[in-house]
Amino acid sequence: MDRSLTNQTPNLSHADSALQERILAGHHAILAQVEYFRSNFGTTESRWKKDGTRVTIVDETISREIFHILQKEFQTDDFCSEEGAETIEPIPTKSEFCWILDPVDGTNNYAVGVPECCISLGLLRHGVPVYGFIYDYGRDNLLQGGKDFGSIEGITPVKAATQLVNEKLTYCMHFPIPTESLKALTQALGVWRIRCPGSAAVGLANVATGRLDGCLEYRAKPWDCAAGAPICEGAGASFHFLNTPVFPLQSFSPSMDSCPFRVGSEIFHKEVIKALKITI
């Protein structure tokens, strides 16, 4: 990432001062962790959590450091991280603004030196994602934006695809997926082109930048899409949950259920709706 580009943000003229302040602070907080993220890639210590997912010292450190920066400025905001402390019950999110962080999305990749991984930070207002930041390690660039602001990668405006990216529908999806959905998709899977980067947020980044037609995720959690959803919407893609929407977010827990979603171009949604027989 060109260091001269680090102060670039989309046009924030539509944002009130409270939102502008948080977008600029989030931008700063992400960039403050980039060198640390880079320097520990593929070499950091890791362990397995009770739920069978990997966590590294980098996950825990970035989670702590980003929130330390933001909490100094916005003490009354809610702060939710995949690496937050487990609680018996989900914690209600009551503040106007809420930050949702995945300090290393694609931890399995990051720990062993596969470059499809990122830092993902979403800003919610009244429970709805309004702005997102994704530091994409593989491209060494910062992607950011929101529905009301447009989206940029570095300093370059990005747009989601409006026509097929390749000769056949090309999209991101990770396995396993529910048996019924697999049955419904069986015929389409023989035709569509699937990419499995190992990071839902990286998949969303590739939708926003027009490198994929869409993303269909069954295993994602709120921290996987809180940043990518508004970035994709800012780039012109549309985002929809497959089941009950998790946003507006009313409570948070690191052990909360998955929230399957689809995001992408009009062509992508049309094909997914047809394959899954979704009633609109």
Image (cartoon, helix red, strand yellow):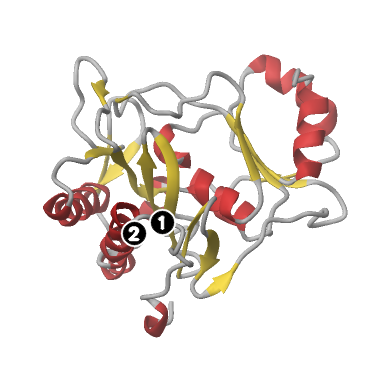
Dot label at residue 221 = none
Image-based side of 95 in relation to 277, left or right: left
The image position of residue 15, as x and y in percent, is: 41, 56
Q: Residues within 10 Å of mark 1 (few under 14, many from 20)?
A: few
Visible residue check, residue 200: yes
Q: Which mark is residue 15?
A: 1
Q: Position of residue 14 (x, y in %)?
A: 46, 58
Q: Residue at x 61, y 56 (%)?
A: 235
State the SS at label 1.
loop
Position of residue 239 relative to residue 135, above or below, is above
Whether residue 217 is visible: no
Q: Residue at x 81, y 43 (%)?
A: 267
Which residue is pictured at 76% across the width and 32% down the height? 272
Q: Is residue 240 left or right of residue 132?
A: right
Taking depth in this image into account, of 189 and 8 the one nearest to the observer is: 8
Quadrant of the snapshot with the N terminus: bottom left
| Three-letter residue code for mark 2 | Gln
Crowding near pointer 2: few (<14 within 10 Å), some, many (20+)?
A: some
Residue 5 position in % (x across, y down): 42, 80
Q: Is residue 203 above or below residue 36?
A: above
Question: In the shown orientation, is residue 120 left or right of residue 154?
Answer: left
* Rendered position, 76 above or below 9: above
Q: Nearer the viewer, residue 129 or 103?
A: 129
Q: Which residue is mark 2?
A: 20
* Picture quarter with the C terminus: top right
Say which amino acid is labelled 1: Ala
Place of residue 279 in the rendered image (x, y in percent of width and height, measured from the top left): 76, 18
Question: In front: 78, or 243?
Answer: 78
Secondary structure of residue under mark 2: helix
Quadrant of the rendered image containing residue 254:
top left
Q: Earlier in the sequence, mark 1 or mark 2?
A: 1
The Cα–Cα distance between marks 1 and 2, rounded to whole angstroms, is: 6 Å
